[in-house]
Image: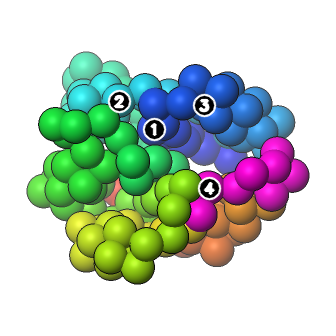
Amino acid sequence: MRGDVLLVDDNEDFLRVARNILIGEDFSVHTAATSREAIAFLERCGTDRGAPLPSFVVLDYRLEIPATALDVLARMARRPLLRAMPVLVISQSRWPEDEAAARAAGATAFREKPSSIRALRELLVRFWKEAVDGAHHPADRG
């Protein structure tokens, strides 16, 4: 197995498709439909409450309010165990100010949400190879 991945998106169809792609690529996948669910999962990482530490996170930029994708990134930045974890932020739009805000909050990459299964598979695999494969896991960094 390549590792664990946390997928965060409020679109059930996207979660299902992305989950199937990543399972096919030999990942263990955890999903969250809201930023609150994502934060709750990430808060359990590395604790006795037993959430596995993801190798990377795929995070939809346009999540519900009041807690947004930027809130997830801010929470991750406060925990040393999560601070260096690779995060791919995806969005339906490519507004430069959205990308700047996501990167300032700690996102590793910001990409437009792919419109085809093939393009999504390519994006997820490429991100894993570029940001995760061969890199030390955040827990190993010191």
Query: Relative to residue 8, is residue 55 depicted above or below?
Result: below
Circle 4 — which element? loop
The magenta-colored residue range is: 112-121
Q: Is residue 55 visible?
A: no
Label 4: few (<14), some (14–19) or many (≥20) C-alpha neighbours in 10 Å: some
Query: Can you identify the residue that label 1 sits on?
Result: 8
Q: Is residue 133 left or right of residue 21?
A: left
Judged from this view, the residue extending furthest toward the left is 78
Badge 3 amino acid: Leu
Circle 1 — which element? strand
Query: Can you identify the residue that label 3 sits on?
Result: 15
Q: Is residue 18 visible?
A: yes
Label 2: few (<14), some (14–19) or many (≥20) C-alpha neighbours in 10 Å: many
Query: Can you identify the residue that label 2 sits on?
Result: 34
Among numbered discs 1 and 3, the one appearing first in the sequence:
1
CA distance separating discs 2 and 1:
7 Å
Circle 3 — which element? helix
The residue lying toward the viewer, choosing from 133 and 72, is 72
Viewer-nearest of discs 1 and 4: 4
Badge 4 amino acid: Lys
Label 3: few (<14), some (14–19) or many (≥20) C-alpha neighbours in 10 Å: some
* Identity of the residue drawn at 27% across and 71% down: 101
| Quarter in which the N terminus is drawn | top right
Among numbered discs 2 and 1, the one appearing first in the sequence:
1
Q: Is there CB contact under 8 Å for labels 2 and 1?
A: yes
CA distance separating discs 4 and 3:
12 Å
* Identity of the residue drawn at 35% across and 69% down: 98
Query: Can you identify the residue that label 4 sits on?
Result: 113
Badge 2 amino acid: Thr
Q: Quadrant of residue 78?
A: bottom left
Among numbered discs 4 and 3, the one appearing first in the sequence:
3
Among numbered discs 4 and 2, the one appearing first in the sequence:
2
